[in-house]
Image (tube, rainbow, N blue to C red):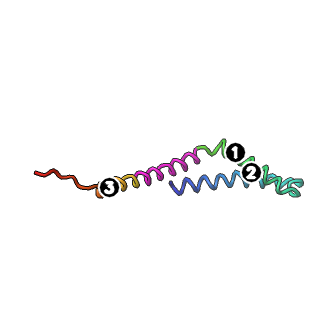
Amino acid sequence: MKARSALVYTVLRLLAFLVPFGILMLFPVMQEYYWLAAIFAALIGLSLSMLFLRRPLDDMTSGLAERRARTKRAASDEDVEDAVTDAPETRSAD
């Protein structure tokens, strides 16, 4: 996983929440009910991220999948080596 792709996705998700929350807090009724503004901002942020942040999410998840495949492959190579070294040697008698 590239740290840059995770950082970009995290910052964009935070902005998708904080910008609508800031706009909603400009309304006097939302200043009184800040928890309602937070709920609306979370729903707006979720919607925005589902619509516009597909590529950063794909970049981040593909990096995670590559890292998981690498560690799984390394573990399977070690298992094969252990099986070869621990197997009883079969030598033909000449």
Q: What stretch is highlighted in magenta?
A: 55-73
Disc 2 from disc 1: Cα separation: 10 Å
- 70 sits to left or right of 17: left
The mark nearer the N terminus, 3 or 2, is 2
| Classed neighbour count for the residue bearing mark 2: other residues with Cα under 10 Å, few (<14), some (14–19), many (≥20) | some
Q: Which residue is drawn at 59% across and 54% down?
A: 8
Asked if the magenta segment contains residue 60, the reply would be yes
Q: Which of 71 and 34 is in front in this view?
A: 71
- Judging by the rendered image, the residue that carries numbered circle 3 is 81
Q: Residue at x 65, y 43 (%)?
A: 52
Residue 73 in the image: x percent, y percent? Answer: 40, 51
Residue 9 in the image: x percent, y percent? Answer: 60, 52
> Is label 3 in a helix, a strand or a loop?
helix
Q: What residue type is labelled 2?
A: Ala
| Residue 48 numbered mark, or none | 1
Q: Which of 42 and 55 is in front in this view?
A: 42
Asked if the magenta segment contains residue 88, the reply would be no
Q: Which amino acid does label 3 sit on?
A: Glu
Residues under numbered marks 3 and 2 in contact, where contact means CB atoms less than 8 Å apart: no
**Magenta portion: prevailing SS class:** helix
> Is label 2 in a helix, a strand or a loop?
helix
Can you name the residue that lies furthest to the top here? 51
- Judging by the rendered image, the residue that carries numbered circle 2 is 42
> Is label 1 in a helix, a strand or a loop?
helix
Disc 1 from disc 3: Cα separation: 49 Å
Residue 91 in the image: x percent, y percent? Answer: 18, 52
Q: Which amino acid does label 1 sit on?
A: Leu
- 33 sits to left or right of 75: right
The mark nearer the N terminus, 1 or 3, is 1
